[in-house]
Image (cartoon, rainbow, N blue to C red):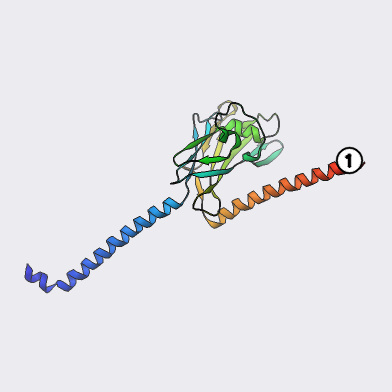
Amino acid sequence: MWGWINDNAAAISAVASIATLMIWVIYLQMLFSGFREGRRAKILINRGGSPTLNGHCLVANMSAKAIFIDAVLLDFSVNDEAGRRHFSYSLSNLTFEDDNASDPRAKLFQGPLAAAEHLDLGTFRTLIERMSPPDFDRFETIESIRITIVATYTSEDRPVAAERVFDIIGERDELVVSPRSYAATQLRSHRQRRRIERSRRDLHQSERDGRDRSASVDARHSIS
């Protein structure tokens, strides 16, 4: 036995070195994965309480640290006799009073969210009603809803975001909000983050343009 070991000492040493190297590579990979996950935000968007429009839209922060929700974006498409129409807005920019909301974050659609904490944004029906035209009640004409959460994370200079699409299926009295994917999509690539930044800039610019136009109209009326 010892003779065989002495005869193959060089080969055994090489195998031991390779095995040690592989162990260190695996260990460093685990350390890097843990470090990366600790620096990356993870936002969940779920449906709770009911599979229908009366179900609640829940947002959970599964990051290692707290996030600050900057905006909740809601997009949905309606397909009726007037054709296909698309509605898109930031719920965080809406002005409304909700005395029933015990958590101000659910009323403002903004605020800090600690690690492992979740926030109830309200029912899907209520979210759509705040976005849709006045007296809109034809929910069966809605094809899908896209919820996008834009937030700020401690270790990120650029905004972090997640989105999830829910399809509206069924008849008028039995409409179901069905998630299209197993989980929310984390928008982490540079292209996706640029898209979020661009949409936010466009929204802010449209607000400025609308205010400028209304100001000019008021000025003309005062002159006349």
Residue at image position (76%, 45%) is 210
Q: Quadrant of residue 13?
A: bottom left
Towards the viewer: 95 or 179: 95
Tell which residue pokes out farthest to the right in this image: 224
* Relative horizontal placement of residue 214, taking residue 156 as reference (left or right): right
Q: Split into 4 quadrants, where in the image is the C terminus?
A: top right
Image position, residue 151 (x, y; %): 55, 46
Q: Mark 1 points at which residue?
A: 222
Residue at image position (25%, 64%) is 20
* Relative horizontal placement of residue 57, taking residue 24 as reference (left or right): right
Determine whether 223 is above or below 194 in the image: above
Q: In which quarter of the image is residue 72?
A: top right
Residue at image position (86%, 43%) is 219
Image position, residue 80 (x, y; %): 68, 36
Q: Residues within 10 Å of mark 1 (few under 14, many from 20)?
A: few
Towards the viewer: 100 or 48: 100
Report how many numbered discs are placed on residues in the image. 1
Residue at image position (68%, 41%) is 85
Determine whether 12 is above or below 95 in the image: below
Image position, residue 126 (x, y; %): 60, 31
Determine whether 65 is above or below 191 in the image: above
Q: Quadrant of residue 207?
A: top right
Q: Split into 4 quadrants, where in the image is the N terminus?
A: bottom left
Image position, residue 163 (x, y; %): 54, 45
Label 1: which secondary element = helix
Amino acid carrying label 1: it is Ser
